[in-house]
Amino acid sequence: MQKKKNDLNNIPAHHKVVVVGGGIAGAGVFRDLSLHNISTLLIDKKDFTSQTSQSSSKMLHGGIRYLENMDFALVWEALHEKNLWLKLTPHLAYPEKFYLPVFRDSLRPLWMVRIGLFIYDALSSFLNVPHEIANIKKVKDHFPFIKSEGLRGAGVYSDAVVDDAKLTLECIYDGLVSPRSFALNHTSLIEAQKTPKGYLLALEDQISGERVQLTCEYLVFTTGPFTDKVLQDLNLFPWQSKLILSRGSHLWIKNETLKATSPMVLTPSDGRVIFVIPQNNKTLVGTTEVVGDASFDQMPSDDEVDYLLKNLSDFFPTAEIDTSCIIEKFAGTRPLVKENPDENLGMVARNHKVYQPQENAYVLLGGKYTTFRIMAQDVVSPLLHKMNKPYLAELTLQPLRAASKIEPWKEVKLNREILRDIITKELPRNEEDLIKRRLGINDIDAFPEVKTFLRDNKDLLPWKAEYQE
């Protein structure tokens, strides 16, 4: 990677492809194009991965609940992608055994769970750690506050925990290894015009207010839940709304609240799925599924928080669960492709779709975080075909070439050299970019030594920052 790769005034005036949207889908497309040595610019109005792609359930998974929808092809694809990324990025993802408890009144009895988990393993081509059935004692050993009444045991299957923001960022860093690739965060596409040779674009830096014009031959939109609004505002081509927006909310709670030592999948009577995933000193609980909107900085509603806490109390009745156990809460909006507007949100398929509304313009919608590499292939392959270039699928099977300086789930240790490398190579442009996504810290006050270091070394920061004692 080179310094100034994210400087609006230091990038070429022409690119073969411009990718709009720097979440996981855009990162996948950007990386794939870069691996094929296509001159590419990635832009995002906010920071890369700062929206939906950092607001997932922090899993790479096949989607155990999609088995009931008969989405076997999607589950097969996602399971193989999950196992691929476990090999390619062991520093960003690790396998875990997920417990699915079964009670006397559960919607799915133990024999049905056993069959479902066998199918899940089979769809992974038996690459998953094999499932098992845990007895009551083993379940209570891992979850001391789980309700005893009617407990029959649990199905145990394999999926993976991931740092969703870091994986997105490292895909972008991998793309930036190519000298022909550039990435601009906090940069908005404010105007696009079709020309005989491609597109004339006007970009605006959302921090400095600077504007530049540049040209490209192909445009790819990977703007997730913002797609309908972005395309209708640009008015580059006719575009009818194609998304159903679904908000998913999560809570981080104190580990001592549940004392869970493994992840668990709760199945409330409403048919939803709630994950309980301990990570280091806190536990993730989610998700919900309510009608969302295309706005930045979403937060869970009071009703969603109450819903999650109530279900935790139902499944862990002897635990002390209330709002005081919440460390943090966050929400993200899923961009589901509209098939039937009246369909239950939880039943809407997570398949992705690629649209080509104009000869050299592509729009990628829907999909699952886990299958982003496949989603990218379905854009890049036809795009390269139009360029009369071969698509080499094996390129995306190689490990990422540029890792983050600060790895997830490890103690954050900074010195001036590491901080300088993060500033110059990992493209943060403000304090939140640095602290939340590059360092992986949600509450800087909980890390006084990091706060002190940044205060004492703020001369390295390209933005004004005042860190108080």
Image (cartoon, helix red, strand yellow):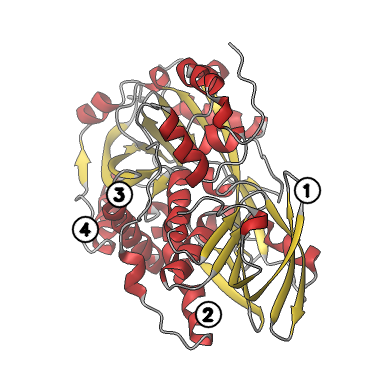
On screen, residue 450 versus residue 64, left or right, reads: right
Q: Secondary structure at mark 3?
A: helix
Marks 4/3: CA–CA distance: 19 Å
Camera-nearest label, 4 or 3? 4
Q: Nearer the viewer, mark 4 or mark 2?
A: 2
Distance (Cα) linking label 2 and label 1? 32 Å
Total numbered badges shown on the rendered structure: 4
Q: Badge 2 local density, few (<14 within 10 Å), some, or many (20+)?
A: many
Residue 37's spot in the image, x, y percent?
A: 44, 72
Which is nearer the N-term, disc 4 or disc 2? 4
Cα–Cα gap, marks 4 and 2 = 32 Å
Q: Would you say residue 344 is visible in this rendering?
A: no
Residue that numbered label 2 is attached to? 383
| Residue where numbered disc 4 is placed | 127
On residue 419, the disc is none
Instruction: Name which residue type carries label 3.
Output: Val
Observer-side mark, 1 or 4, equals 1
Residue 111 lies, in percent from the top left, at 26, 49
Give amino acid for label 1: Gly
Q: Helix or strand or loop: what does disc 1 sit on?
A: loop
Identify residue for label 1.
209
Q: From mark 2 to mark 3, how far is it between C-alphas?
A: 42 Å
Quadrant occupied by the N terminus: bottom left
Q: Position of residue 286 (x, y in %)?
A: 50, 38
Q: Disc 4 on helix, strand or loop?
A: loop
Disc 1 or 4, which lies upstream in sequence?
Answer: 4
Which residue position holds label 3? 113
Mark toward the start of the polypeptide (1 vs 3): 3
The nearer-to-camera label among 2 and 1 is 1
37 over 308 or under it: above or below: below
Inter-mark Cα distance, 1 to 4 = 50 Å
